Image: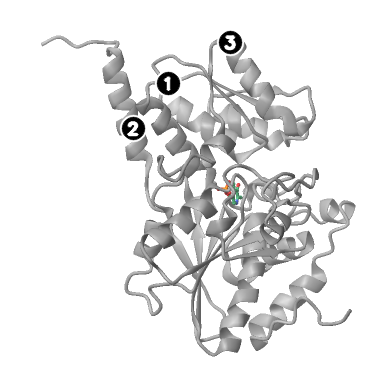
Amino acid sequence: MTERSVPPPDDWAARALRDLAADAAPTPLRPVRLPALPEIDLYVKDESAHPTGSVKHRLLRELFRAAVQDGTLIEGTPVVMGSGGAAAVAGAYFARLLGLPFTAVLPRTAPAAVHDRIAAHGGRCRTGELPPAAVLEEARTLAGRTGGRFLDHFAAAGRSPDGPAPMPDLGTEILDGLRGARHPVPRWLVTGAGTGATSASLGRHLRRHGLPTRLAVADPEHSAYFPAWASGCDDYATGMPSRIPGIGRPRTEPGFRPELIDLVVPVPDTASVAAMRWLHRTAGLACGPATGTALWAACHLAARLRAEGTGGGLVLLAGDGAEPYRTTHLDAGWLAAKGLEPAPYEAELARFAESGRWTWPPASR
Ligand SMILES: *Cc1c(COP(=O)(O)O)cnc(C)c1O
């Protein structure tokens, strides 16, 4: 027997698929106590526990798996992505896992922390020359020019329902995690939507298994998703960027599937920030602003269940952790400069936790 130092291509692909499969580990489901609502069980599905700290880890693992499997990603292929944040960080991680060179095209507005995190995973960063929304196109062009493989996480999220599930096992993981709980089948799942992959995957899971659980999307200001869902206009665009990283889009992305979503709840950005802070203070969970958006919507739904007199379980997605937001959404000066004043919304949450009564939006007008 002789050892080969360089495995032949088939071995490379086989090993890549094994390494990707070995990376998959379930993330924790964390209970959040609501003392004034004893009939409600609220859980946070903590996607910040992935090695790259966000739910994009799941999406990118599947993207790499599909590309290796269909033979479009082979040994030595340079990988190129266009993203302003967590997706590119996860892309850099998986490229390094498979030993592939990685370049991210970032918008000019990307914070230094994102550059640092991509570099920490061995990736290279380029700053796009066009407006932020054009980084996907710039990345595609760069890949074409350099013989690289462009990974388009927005297009992948919109793949047909019969294709590979872009967010494998998220629904299964949540339901497995609730086995033996008082309410093993939740009344609601609540998530934000960026590419739309998470909500589409959850919606399909619920339908495939015939579950009575309903799916809510919590949507930040400026996002096209709430108006698209409410109006039935599937190419709705606002043209305005979201201030809640990871969720809310200026246009309706191909992965957003309104027909799988029972309710879209528009959430003010200040409420998202307040809910993020409240979750940290009262439950010790250091999550990002998008989790605040989902939590605000979940409170609204918990109050509804209480009003119906039924109780039940609610699971909300924590798409990332607090760490990347120390100098932005967690910083008082940054919030003030953006005109975000979370105190009244935090008071609303505290009132809700104490009384179980939800009075948002105020009835006046
Ligand atoms: C991407 C993202 C989501 C939503 O995920 P999609 O599957 O892209 O819709 C939620 N939270 C955070 C923090 C994200 O980065």
Q: On the picture, is 20 further left or further right than 198?
A: left
Decide which of tag 1 and tag 3 comes sooner along the chain: 1
**In the image: residue 332, left or right of residue 278:** right
Quadrant in which residue 80 is drawn:
top right
Q: Is mark 3 on a helix, strand or loop?
A: helix
Could you tell me the amino acid type at mark 1?
Thr
Looking at the rendered structure, the kind of residue marked 3 is Thr
**Mark 1 closeness class: few <14, some 14–19, many ≥20 residues within 10 Å:** few
Residue 146 image label: 3
User: Quadrant of the rendered structure where residue 209 is?
Assistant: bottom left
Q: Distance between the residues labelled 2 and 3?
A: 26 Å
Measured from the top left, where is residue 194 in percent x and y? 62, 47
The residue sitting at 69% across, 22% down in the picture is 138
Q: How crowded is mark 3: few (under 14 residues within 10 Å), some or many (20 or more)?
A: few
Amino acid identity at mark 2: Asp
Give x and y (percent) for residue 51.
47, 42
Q: Which of 259 and 55 is in front in this view?
A: 259
Which mark, residue 330? none
Say if residue 35 shows up in the picture: no
Q: Dot 2 lies on which element?
A: helix
Q: Residue farthest to the front? A: 232
